[in-house]
Each structure stands twice: as C-alpha cells, then as structure tokens.
Amino acid sequence: MFKFNFDVDAEASEDPEAVKSPFADQKEDNPEKPESEDAKDIDWYQSEKVKRTDNLLATLDFYELNAKEIDVGNTKLKHLVAGFLLEDIKTQTHLVNLDIRKSEENHSDLIAGVYEGGAKIWECTDDLLLYLSEKFKESYWQGKRVLDLGCGSGLLGIYAMKLGARADFQDYNKDVLEYITFPNILLNVEESLTDDEKSEYLENKTSLYSGDWAHFALQTKDVEKYDLILTSETIYNIDNQQKLLDTFADRLQTDGIVLVAAKSHYFGVGGGLEQFADKIKRGNVFQSENVWQADENLKRGILQLKFK
C-alpha cells in the first residue's frame, strides 16, 4: 500500500517512477488491458444521503474540548484535531469496520475504492480558504448554493455557510461524513442554539452525500445546481478525473464557478494541476484559469473553471 508523499523534492517529478499512478503496477502486469479498465475493476461505493449519528449531539461537548480554532480572514472556524479523532476511533470496539480505521491500520492515506484520505486537512484546503477570504467579498455568499466536493473535514463548505451560503458536502467515505464533517459543522454553529435547533439546522441548511462521484451526480440530478463548487486535493488519481469533470458539468449552474486547489504534481499517485488543466482543455467543456500559485518548491495552485 502506498502513501501520499508530499515531502519529495519538486525536481523528482522528472523521474517517471515519481509520478506513477496507483494502478501502474497492475497495468505493467497486464499491458494489453485498456487503461480505463483498472478503474472499472474497483467496486466504488454507491452514493447515499448521509444522516448524523444518533449520539452526535450528546458528544458535542467532548468534541469541543478536542477542537482547534483557526482564523480565515475575519472568520473563525473550528475543527476536530485529526490525531485525537483517529485515536478515539481506535478505542471504540464497535467501530472496527470503519474505513478510517482500516486506513490507520494499513498506515495509508489512500486505499483505492475504500478510503480517500478524508480524515486529514491537506494543505491545499488552507490555500483555498485563504484565497476565498481574500478574493470573495462577504456579501458574495448571501443566498449562494455551494458544494464542498471531496469535503473531508468540510472546512470549505463550513466557511461558506458561516458567511451566509447554503452548503452541501460530498465525500467518498460515509464514516468521514459521520465522524468528521458532521461534528465540524456543529462546532461552527451558534453556541446558543438548543439541541433541537441544531438538529433542525442540520436537517434544513445542508445535505451530506457519500460515495463515488458518478453515482453522486446521478443521485442529485433533481437537486438544484450550485453557484460554486469547491474542491481540494481531488485530482491525484488520473483515472477518476473524468468523473470529477462530469460531476462539475452535471452539478454546476450555467454561470457558476468551480475552484480546484491542488499540487502541481502528486508524487507516487499520478495527477497534477498542469496535467489536469490539459485534460480540461482537451475536453472542450470548461475554460480554466490558474488564479493562484504558491511560491514554494512543491508548487501548489488553484484553477478556476467556467463553462465555455
């Protein structure tokens, strides 16, 4: 099993082994197999609308004691500390089948078709939060419909909600939504709300969906489309990129915007910003623009997509 390696020197990208897809070894063992069949062989989780766990409200005070607060512009966000959460899950004997737990036992941030790294807050999420706070006026968010796609902790959508948007959340893993995203949402609502009001908030102000992107797009085809889709660190697997682009096309308003925060290269797993931008251009559905770039060895950036 492999692990994301974000500490490799940027020049290592010239080594073909440094940018191997997670399915590369399978392709070498069976070279006549069409490239797309590797992804098809994976039994991707079907999409479902996820509800909060029964004990979420009862454990919220415990979560509060183990939460971290960050400043994003003028907005404060709270989120669970990943280390605390993972250790807590390990102690819960009734949670042995959680995908998060499997990832920890395998010492891997990614198990294809099983777990997609949602327990951690990757650095491109911080980049996108900073970009939103600097480039989008607070008045922009009022009445907007926002989708946090591949949400993990949900900080992008939570930021939008705190400034007046309606935000929905999607992550591949149901247990990431149940044990990370839902608690983080409630950590950021008004503390004065009663438990009943918090339940009503979750019921009426947001929806959470798990499963594969292709299934998610089908499940939500009758749901109102989004003004803004936010996604971070979701383009590492080349085999899943078309599903991601199709989901953008299916769920975005005709005048909407997509913001994709990612690294220039994902060493050991394949994708990257330049490669993804080229795929967008060849697809001839969206126009893309690099709107932000980090000035560091391991380059990170943000792509903005709009319909042509």
Image (spheres, rainbow, N blue to C red):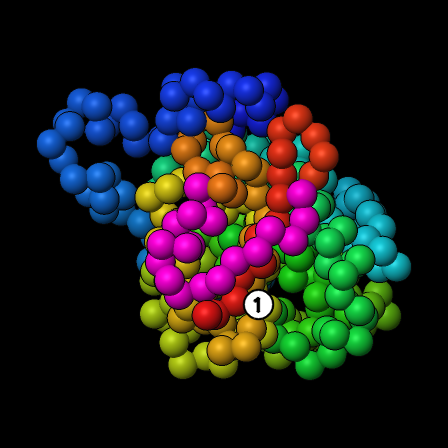
Q: Residue furthest left?
A: 32
Callout 1 secondary element: strand
Q: Taking the image as drawn, is residue 112 in sight?
A: yes
- Tell me which amino acid carries mark 1: Ile
Position above or below: 291 against 107? below
Residue 275, located in which quarter of the rendered image?
top left
Start-end of magenta stretch: 275-293
Count the marks. Answer: 1
Relative horizontal placement of residue 170, taking residue 200 as reference (left or right): left
Q: Which residue is mark 1?
A: 257
Residue located 36% across and 54% down the image? 282
Residue located 62% across and 34% down the image? 299
- The question of residue 160 being in magenta is answered with no
Position above or below: 250 against 224? above
> Residue 247's spot in the image, x, y percent?
41, 63
Judge by depth and name the residue closer to the eye, 204 or 12.
12
Residue 49, located in which quarter of the rendered image?
bottom left
Residue located 27% across and 43% down the image? 39
